[in-house]
Amino acid sequence: MIVIDTSVFIDAERKKLPAESRLRELLAGRLGELAVSAVTVLELLRSPRLDRAWRDFYARLFDSLQVLVVDRRAAALGAAIALQRRREGRTMQNTDALIAGCAAAEGAELLVTTDQDFSGIRHFRVELLRPP
Amino acid sequence: MARRKSVDLTIRLTPTQRRKLDRTARKKLGSRRSTGTWVRSLALEAADREERAQDLLRRLARLPAAHAHADDVERRRREDGR
């Protein structure tokens, strides 16, 4: 399972290349393995600034991939990951911790992100997309 | 005139491949459904996934940049408790 973090969609909305091209690649070749956390669904859909075309795209996208639920296990794993990061002197937002917890709870092999806060998490591999 | 293809699809397998498929189908579905039904559902799922992927890619290519929304999501993320 490959989990796509919210940050990839944010950059894709800005038409930034590494994120948009990686998203294309994943959709083209690995749609059956893709997942997002329910947190990502909330983050992307809650804003009134989301226009109709993007809203429609996300609706179809979330119908086509696995949406990971935030349950007790995911939340507890997210908390443990955030706590570990804190011991290492790094902070983590609640939303990021929940996304990491969802990925860890499902045994994801890879999390794709543009956000450095995920790097170094040991529960899964992290692919950090950087601007060219 | 173009010849219409039959709706039946025959696939040729070696005995080893057939045994392997039978074993996996039994494991996945139990003994009540046939290997053919299982292979059919897998193939149709793959075709459906491919269709969805192509549709999503076409849509993504046509979408305009959405800077205001991206900024909004990012701002909310920053405001989120650390």
Image (cartoon, coloured by chain):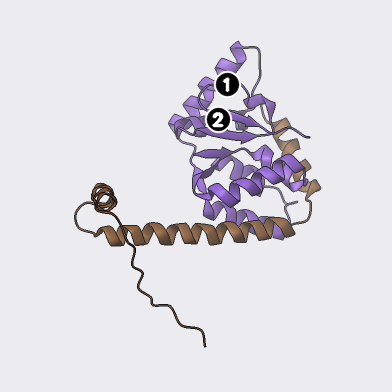
Chain colours: A purple, B brown
Of circles 2 and 1, the one toward us is 2
Considering only vertical position in the picture, is A123 above or below A61? above
Which chain does tag 1 point to?
A
Question: Farthest residue in the front direction?
Answer: B14
The image quadrant that residue B34 belongs to is bottom left
A20 relative to B7 in the view: left or right: right
Between A120 and B24, which is closer to the camera in this rendering?
Answer: B24
Alpha carbon of mark 2 to alpha carbon of mark 1: how far?
9 Å
Q: Position of residue B12 (x, y in %)?
A: 32, 61
**Residue matched to label 1:** A82
10 Å neighbourhood of mark 1: few (<14), some, or many (≥20)? Answer: many
Residue depicted at 62% across the width and 57% down the height: B56
What is the quadrant of the C terminus of chain B in the image?
Answer: top right
Which residue type carries mark 1? Ala
Q: Are marks 2 and 1 in contact (CB under 8 Å)?
A: yes
Residue A100 tag number: 2
**Residue A112 placed where, x, y %?**
61, 35
Q: In front: A6, or B42?
A: B42
**SS for dot 1:** helix
At a point 51% along the width and 30% down the height, the residue shown is: A101
In the depicted structure, whether residue A7 falls above or below residue B9: above
Instruction: Between residue A15 and residue A38, name the one nearer to us.
Output: A15
Kind of residue at badge 2: Ala
Residue B60 image label: none
- Image-based side of B61 in relation to B40, left or right: right
Q: Could you tell me which chain the residue with mark 2 belongs to?
A: A
Asked whether, in this view, residue A132 is left or right of residue A90, the answer is: right
